[in-house]
Amino acid sequence: MLSEKEIRRYSRHIRMVEIGEKGQEKLKQAKVLVVGAGGLGCPILQYLTAAGVGTIGILDYDTVDESNLQRQILFTPEDIDKPKALVAKEKLSKQNPFVNFNIHFLKLTKKNALDIFNDYDIIVEGSDNFPTRYLTNDACVILKKPLVYGAIEKFYGQITVFNYLNGPTLRCLAPEPPDPLEIPSCSDVGVMGVMPGIIGTMQACEVIKIITGVGNVLNGRLLLVDALNFNFDTIELEKNPDSDTITELKDYTDFCTNETTVKKISAKELRNLLDCKEKIVIIDLRDEDDTENFSIATDNIPLGEISKNIHKIPIDIKVVFACRYGIKSLSAINYLQKKSDFTNLYSLENGIAEWNATLEK
């Protein structure tokens, strides 16, 4: 039952014949998990909180970065370096004291996904990487949970509802994830600051429709949004019967990097090679805005441009890939070894950060 204060707060919902007091009570009883508290997650969380969804889970293990502030509207400069999930709970609790928040300040994995998802009615996808998206999809298929999906890039976005009433899943749209280096990320190509608000608000709307049972849910339809020209298009999705045969979760990080197939070189070993004047090529994978000093002459190919510059990478001498912490270099080599017969590639272990720390000793 709604209290008098709740009836006053949600009066504009209650006046709508499509929702009414019964619909608002359904919202109060609902449990929704939002995966990711970033660009999409912020408007999703804010509108679900304002709408009075009774229990909202916030799953995110990242911290606030200054580059987030252009679009992640829950955060301010004072929040930089703080956990997004905890900051979000603090601010959203002030927005609506009638909502309960569950914080999952952890990385989503195949070991914890089913246990976490099992406690919620609806899962909302707000992450920015394919391993998490496919892990989320497969967990929803196994548990038979609807998944409200959204994605953004530059001026463009897309939204649909997967796994709803035996409808299509993410694997009906794309049976296997693309290689992350062939699909540019927001950090590579950028994103218009308002795009998460447009798509995230639509996702929140779909959640409310599912809970209250009103309207036509985007089930079996992928809505494409072109905000640059303000065009909307819809693609019909067909159900692939094989998409329902998932019975267990995989090791989804293998879609990005498989460390067992990547050769590594330590900062000390690289220094020894350079001291011995061994012929070697070093490729810096960082973007221009990374100002960390690197005292070696290198070629620069940002990670997002590797797929277009394979021809520039030698095959007959040692090639060392470097990035700040040694993560991008693993992705680059994993991708290149899948695409071509490279056997001469090395990742600078722990990246430029360790190289600089080694020089200081």
Image (cartoon, grey):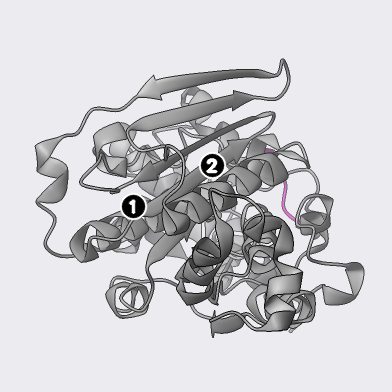
Residue 296: say if magenta: yes
Q: Position of residue 72 (x, y in %)?
A: 75, 57
**Mark drawn on residue 151:** 2
Badge 1, how many Cα within 10 Å: few under 14, some, many 20+?
many
- Give the quarter of the figure containing the C terminus: bottom right
Q: Residue at x 46, y 21 (%)?
A: 234
Badge 2, how many Cα within 10 Å: few under 14, some, many 20+?
many
**Helix, strand or loop under label 2:** strand
The magenta stretch spans which residues?
A: 295-300
Horizontal relation, residue 1 to residue 346: left or right: right
Q: Residue at x 81, y 66 (%)?
A: 75
Numbered marks: total = 2
Horizontal relation, residue 323 to residue 207: left or right: right
**Mark drawn on residue 284:** none
Q: Position of residue 176 (x, y in %)?
A: 26, 40
**Which of these two is toward me, 150 or 130?**
150
